[in-house]
Image (cartoon, rainbow, N blue to C red):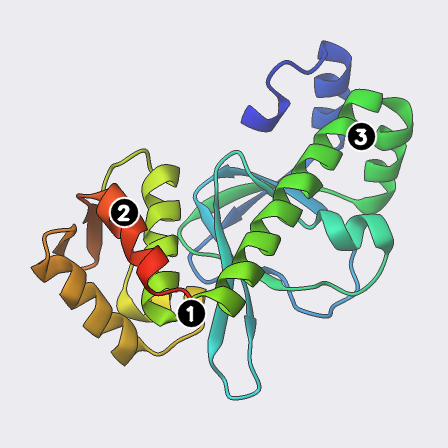
Amino acid sequence: MQVLDGASAGLVDALCERLSVLKLSAGDVVVEYLERSGDFFFILDGEMRVSMVADSGRLLTYEVLRAGDMFGEVAALDGLPRTASVAAETEALVARLDGTALAGLIEAYTEFAMILLRRLARLNRHLTTRLMEYHAYDVKARVCAELIRLNRRYDGEAFRITDQDMASRIGSTRENVSRIHGELRKLGLVERQRSNMQVVNEPMISAFIADHEFT
């Protein structure tokens, strides 16, 4: 697992002894919003969507995680209900660690505690950035910010994003997102074939963000 790169052999062995592997089909739900469970998960293959459903029924996406990522740490650590649902976006393999085993590994291996702390720090940075964007940017700027985030996550390669998916990520409607994607495509800033998007000019997309910040 990428997250354990550089970890001691003792930690890796102790962790692997306690893991169980789940094979998932697209759509399978692993964690339900507000459920009480303490399992912690590593993604071995595939993608997992972290989301909530609003009272209106609209899907709100926080993040789509990939192989090497982790999830479930918040409820596993504080014992409170889950803060979001997590479902398989594609066929996936995840490794599950129950909460009791997690607590034991944290006590026994300081390096494992540091791995979790770094993960929580990254999560805090991500959510803080998303919160700032929601309050500071209009819809076009939020679309541009998410495109830049995806472009960097996929190292400049094309990535799959539908208008509905983008709308769920940035808190808008499919119609608004479709219009903005069309504008960016006409300007030559992105290329699109069906649901596959590729950012062509990230600096210019970044400039759009400054032009569409609330004042």
Label 3 crowd (10 A; few <14 / some 14-19 / many >=20): some
Q: CA distance from mark 2 to mark 3?
A: 33 Å
Residue in view at x 39 percent, y 63 percent? 142
Residue in view at x 59 percent, y 18 percent? 5
Tell me which label, 2 or 3, sits earlier in the chain: 3
Q: Quadrant of residue 27?
A: bottom left
Q: Nearer the viewer, residue 149 or 31?
A: 149
Label annotation for residue 113: 3
Q: Position of residue 23 (x, y in %)?
A: 52, 46
The answer to whether residue 15 is left or right of residue 156 is: right
Q: Is residue 214 above or below residue 189?
A: below
Furthest residue to the bottom?
Answer: 56
Going by the numbered disc 1, the residue's amino acid type is: Ser
Label annotation for residue 168: 1
The answer to whether one can see residue 204 in this image is: yes
Label annotation for residue 159: 2
Quarter of the image with the N terminus in it: top right
